[in-house]
Amino acid sequence: MTRRLILMRHAKSSWGDPTLPDHARPLNGRGRRSAKALGNWLRENGYTPDEVLCSSSSRTRETLDRLTLDAPTTFLDSLYHASPRSMFNELTRATGACVLMLGHNPGIAGFAESILATPPEHPRFHDYPTCATLVADFDIKNWSDMTKASGTPLAFVIPRELTG
């Protein structure tokens, strides 16, 4: 059996209101366009999750909303600026066959590197820019069976490749 992970960093956020706490920052215009483009890309390629694990921050929630995907979602404070270890722990509790995990850097880049047997050949993979998205398969029956360095990358895309 195979499990699929879609690992996405939130879209570009706004720094327009310096009084907002970090957790409450919304997306900027570019971020809103990027999230919509990524949602279209996911659907066009058949990468549709049946479960979503999303950081509780405003920018991850808005990114998810603009993806316009229809999947049961759990918003987790534990994914807000999570370490790779915390992300791993949350994923091992998932039950979906295809899980979208939506979070933040630097944790998401470290997590992506730790779960793949070999990284995708993409110049931006290691810095994981905003709204960057990895799709990877794992030859496991349950997420609780996942081990590090076991995933096979299927795709890695950044918004600029979709929006020009």
Image (cartoon, rainbow, N blue to C red):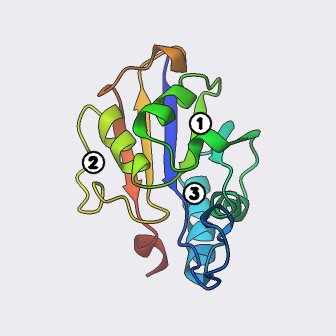
Q: Marks 1 and 3, Cα distance to the nearest angstrom? A: 17 Å
Q: Inspect the image, locate mark 2, and give the three-letter code of the amino acid beneath it.
A: Pro
Mark toward the viewer: 1 or 3: 1
Count residues near mark 1 (Cα–Cα under 10 Å), then give few for <14, some for 14-19, many for 20+. Answer: many
Give the mark nearest the N terminus, 2 or 3: 3
Give the mark nearest the N terminus, 1 or 3: 3
| Numbered marks: total | 3
Q: Marks 2 and 3, Cα distance to the nearest angstrom? A: 20 Å
Up-down relation of residue 141 to residue 93 (above or below)? above
Q: Inspect the image, locate mark 3, and give the three-letter code of the amino acid beneath it.
A: Glu
Q: Depth check: give the residue in front, 141 or 84.
A: 84
Q: Where is residue 27 shown, x and y percent of the image?
A: 63, 73
The quarter of the image holding the C terminus is bottom left
Tell me the residue that label 1 is attached to: 99
In the displayed structure, does residue 81 sit left or right of residue 93?
Answer: left
Question: Which of the labelled discs sits on residue 44, or is there none?
Answer: 3
Tell me the residue that label 2 is attached to: 120
In the displayed structure, does residue 82 sit left or right of residue 95?
Answer: left
Q: Where is residue 139 shown, x and y percent of the image?
A: 41, 20
Q: Inspect the image, locate mark 1, and give the three-letter code of the amino acid beneath it.
A: Val
